[in-house]
Amino acid sequence: MMHKPQKPSLEILKRYYQEVFQPDQLVSLIGLADFRHREFGFLLSDNIFIRNISFRSPSAIKNFMSTRVPLQASIGAVYDKPPSKDNPIQKLEWKYRELVFDIDLNEYDAVRTCGCAGSDTYCIECWSLIDDAMLLLDDTMRNDFGFNQLTWLYSGRRGVHLWIFDDTAKFLNQDVRTAIINYLSMIRGDEYIEPLPGYAKLFVTRLVEILATSYVQYASLEELQAQGFQKNEARTLKDGVTTKRFTRERFARSLPRDVDPKKFLQQAIRMRYPRIDRSVTIDTRHLLRIVGTIHSKTGKMCTIIKDITHFAPEMVPTVWELLQ
Ligand SMILES: [Zn+2]
């Protein structure tokens, strides 16, 4: 099943921001303490992008949204003074910014074997790439880095954002964020690259459990045959993962002698490893979409993902449904 988005009119967006939108979810995430010192940015309805905007209170954002009706609303870092035209962020002292990750389905085009391509179509099969990315990154951030205040957002189109609110994450400078991104880098473009030395053992376990399982689940018999399986072996392997994910032990046991487990895992990584946008994580002034706002190309709301193991974009209401 393919999903083709529909574009809401400005009139519809305006009604949404006047009648439905509340900044309470945003406040529950970022808090009120530094609210006035937070940078916001907007793509206005005449396609002009403005940033260096700050608000005195959440109700001031509500007011802005319902009068200006921006096509896109984003949030950035916290500074020592409220950002404004006269006090642009370049002049201000950067205080902190949550650690964020951006994963988008259009970065996967080369490995989407389901037939979907481009930015506006996806199916359950290609969304499973995003599911894997969320599982892998969530587990890595909690277990390898010890963060525990994680929130996942659906962007409203074909991507997800991870926000990490731990104090130990918020104040990290660009160098440390770059090091974290490098730790996570196992592909460059669509090619496998050898990980950094001293790689956590945990990491290999989750590569097998998450990526190798899904790879076998979604690969065609022909693709598995190209990796050295006989047709019946490929079928048995696929049957085996439909009910239970691989463990490291079962993975090693499940492969026939002609298939090198290391090479096979590398292929799973190449095909399914999270395509993380490096610059979004590294750039501590980057702006990201505000929860509760509407994606102007799809009419879908940017939404908190409550359970990353059971999420599909179809669960997210559209602006038309929200206005009913
Ligand atoms: Zn697809």
Image (spheres, rainbow, N blue to C red):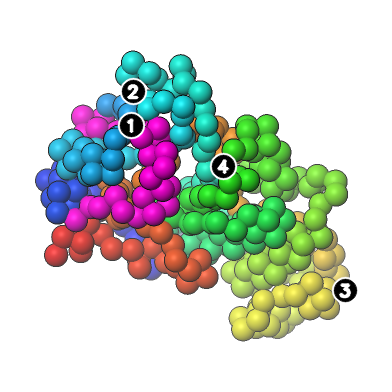
Spot occupied by residue 15 in the image (x, y as percentages of width and height):
13, 50
Snapshot quadrant of residue 225: bottom right
Residue 26 drawn in magenta: yes
Three-letter amino acid code at the position of disc 3 = Arg
Mark 4: secondary structure: helix
Image quarter of the N terminus: bottom left
Residue wearing tag 1: 54
Mark 3 vs 4, N-terminal side: 4
Mark 1 vs 4, N-terminal side: 1
- State which mark lies toward you, 2 or 3: 2
- Measure the alpha-carbon separation of dots 1 and 2: 6 Å
Vertical relation: 83 (above or below) 127: above
Residue sitting at 38 percent across and 45 percent down?
Answer: 32
Three-letter amino acid code at the position of disc 1 = Ser
Are the residues tagged 1 and 3 within 8 Å (C-beta)?
no
Three-letter amino acid code at the position of disc 2 = Ser
Residue sitting at 19 percent across and 41 percent down?
Answer: 63
Q: Residues within 10 Å of mark 1 (few under 14, many from 20)?
A: many
Residue wearing tag 4: 170
Q: For this view, does 78 lie left or right of residue 61? A: right
Are the residues tagged 1 and 2 within 8 Å (C-beta)?
yes
Three-letter amino acid code at the position of disc 4 = Lys
Residue wearing tag 3: 257
Q: Nearer the viewer, residue 322 or 21?
A: 21
Stretch of the chain drawn in magenta: 20-47
- Measure the alpha-carbon separation of dots 3 and 4: 47 Å
Mark 2: secondary structure: loop
Mark 1 vs 3, N-terminal side: 1
